[in-house]
Image (tube, rainbow, N blue to C red):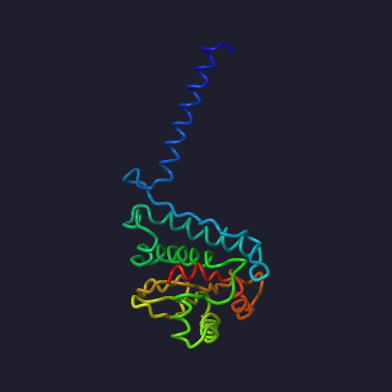
Amino acid sequence: MNKKLSIIIVLALMIGLSVQGKGLKTINNTNDKKNTTMKFELPKLPYETNALEPVIGKQTVELHYGKHYQTYLTNLNNLVPGTKFENADLETIVKESDGAIFNNAGQALNHYIYFLSFSPKGGGEPSGKLGDAIKAQFGSFDKFKEDFEKASIGVFGAGWAWLSKDKDGKLHITQESNAGTPLTKGYTPLLGFDVWEHSYYLDYQNRRADHVKELWKIIDWKAVEARF
């Protein structure tokens, strides 16, 4: 290959990489152009899909995270273009939307908190300010667990049980149906148990109570405390 041809090839490659780089920047940076719509994506899990076994099986994580959660995000990304929410953050969409946009945004937020509340080295009890607040308000961590399990098991049909805090720092245990979230009540969600059947049926069939009781073994209290 002669020197002139080599220079031409190198220049062509440099131009190609430059074009690709600009394209990636446009895709990833939602503020580059006025009409670019925000894209919501799956967060990276801080554990392998089999790491939560036997509490939550690998297949359940792969289907729940990779299929159900992804579907909510895909739906949301398809619904917001052309609306006032196309450049809004997720919390704003949840607080201000209704209908299909709310359902998918609510589930996107709920699952974000849910999947980032687990660790294969989890379990035990919360410490610090959250641990103190739970003991002060519920009397003991065991009494809090009892109340939270009751709320989780008692959700009719599909939904969630949530531990959240209000603007004054008071803790609340609430039941939310379908895509419901305590954020719409003005509360800050801290910990949510998903009791839609797709979250546990492969591992526990209709034994929701068993699933709920096992979840304590994988709760990452450091992650929950960081939201308090």
Residue 29 location, x and y as percent? 40, 46
Quadrant of res 33: top left
**Looking at the image, residue 127 lies above or below residue 61:** below
**Numbered circles on residues, count:** 0
Q: Name the image quarter holding the N terminus.
A: top right
Q: Residue at x 42, y 80 (%)?
A: 171
Q: Name the image quarter holding the C terminus.
A: bottom left
Would residue 5 be found to the left or right of residue 96 on screen?
A: right
Query: As drawn, which residue projects farthest toward the right?
Result: 54
Of residues 114 and 68, the one drawn nearer to the viewer in this rendering: 114
Q: Residue at x 46, y 76 (%)?
A: 130
Query: As drawn, which residue projects farthest toward the front?
Result: 128
Residue 162 location, x and y as percent? 47, 76
Q: Residue at x 62, y 76 (%)?
A: 214
Q: Residue at x 48, y 84 (%)?
A: 135
Would residue 157 be found to the left or right of residue 54 on screen?
A: left
Of residues 88 and 144, the one drawn nearer to the viewer in this rendering: 144
**Looking at the image, residue 78 lies above or below residue 104:** above
Of residues 133 and 1, the one drawn nearer to the viewer in this rendering: 133
